[in-house]
Image (tube, rainbow, N blue to C red):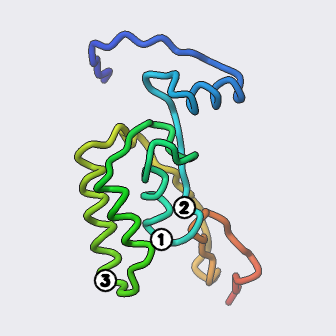
Amino acid sequence: MALKLGIDVTIDNSEWQVYLDKVSNLDYDAARMGWIADYNDAYTFLEQYDSADNGNNDTGWENPKYAELLKQSITEQDADARIDLMKQAEAIAMTEFPVAPVYYYTNLSVKKDYVKNMQLDSLGNMYLKYVDINK
């Protein structure tokens, strides 16, 4: 079943560097972008939008309250209070965000029951040196 949104779209297929230049200059109406965690913490996703001049913010969106909450979360020593600050920032972003998540990266694998310790890290890498085979 096809869903019709009533939107006329022209696809601009560019060479990679041309595309990156257009995105960094905000020369687009919609663009495909992706981000994966650099480390296991929500901040790695939230900080890319802390200001419009952040090199990872290809949207031009900024919110001073959002940026202030993130700044406070960097120095907060209490883990629960830090998470609360990031949740507050996330709530602002989800209300105003210029991003529409369409799909998420997935990793599929098949293994026998006797293969143990086969896990992916936060970047989707699998290190076979930790795998045990108990047959």
**Residue to which mark 1 is pinned:** 41
- Residue 9 pos. (x, y %): 42, 13
Counting other residues with Cα less than 10 Å from the Cα at mark 3, is it few (<14), some (14-19), or many (20 or more)?
Answer: few
**Residue to which mark 3 is pinned:** 80
Residue sitting nearer the eye, 33 or 22: 22
Secondary structure category for the residue under label 2: loop
- Residue 105 pos. (x, y %): 52, 51
Q: Amino acid at mark 3?
A: Asp
Q: Residue at x 62, y 83 (%)?
A: 117
Nearer-N-terminus badge (3/2): 2
Residue sitting nearer the eye, 13 or 131: 13
Q: Amino acid at mark 2?
A: Ala
- Residue 76 pos. (x, y %): 38, 80
Marks 3 and 2, Cα distance to the nearest angstrom?
21 Å
Residue 83 appears left or right of 109:
left
Quadrant containing the C terminus in the rendered view: bottom right
Secondary structure category for the residue under label 1: loop
- Residue 75 pos. (x, y %): 43, 78
Q: Are marks 2 and 1 in contact (CB under 8 Å)?
A: yes
Nearer-N-terminus badge (3/1): 1
Can you tell which mark lies on residue 37? 2
Residue sitting nearer the eye, 86 or 109: 86
Secondary structure category for the residue under label 3: helix
Q: Amino acid at mark 1?
A: Asp
